[in-house]
Amino acid sequence: MGAQSFLCHATAMQPPFRTDEKTLARRELQIERKQMTVEMRENLRGRFLRIVEKCGGKTNVVIIPDTGINDFYAALDEVIAETNALAHPSQEG
């Protein structure tokens, strides 16, 4: 068996979820048609924020290590503040 076929075979045998991860906190949101899940998880490498978006059969995942959560939160807060300062198109004349 070649190295490439061994890797494919080994990958196929992995479980569909990480058994070494633990969920510390979890919140679910329904935003319009999107189902959102926000989780703080932990594995052997540390804690991380996991954001999952499901819509129309597609799933998107964003993972942020806990070392970057404060920076992510600050950037998100700044972007929201900047856009809130702009006029909303529906409020214009």
Image (tube, rainbow, N blue to C red):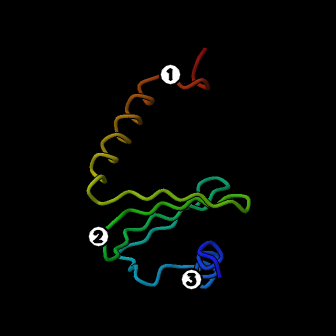
Q: Give amino acid for label 2.
A: Gly
Give the residue at mark 2.
46
Query: Left or right: 31 with respect to 80?
Result: right
> Are the two marked residues, 1 and 3, in contact with CB atoms closer than 8 angstroms?
no
Query: Left or right: 77 with respect to 57?
Result: left
Distance between mark 2 and mark 3 Cα atoms: 21 Å
Q: Nearer the viewer, mark 1 or mark 2?
A: 2
Report x, y in % for residue 55: 68, 58
Query: Left or right: 89 with respect to 67?
Result: right
Crowding at label 1, few (<14), some or many (≥20) Cα neighbours within 10 Å?
Answer: few
Q: Which mark is residue 14?
A: 3
> Are the two marked residues, 1 and 2, in contact with CB atoms closer than 8 angstroms?
no
Crowding at label 2, few (<14), some or many (≥20) Cα neighbours within 10 Å?
Answer: few
Report x, y in % for residue 5: 66, 76
Q: Quadrant of the N terminus?
A: bottom right
Distance between mark 1 and mark 3 Cα atoms: 50 Å
Give the residue at mark 1.
87
Q: Give amino acid for label 3.
A: Gln
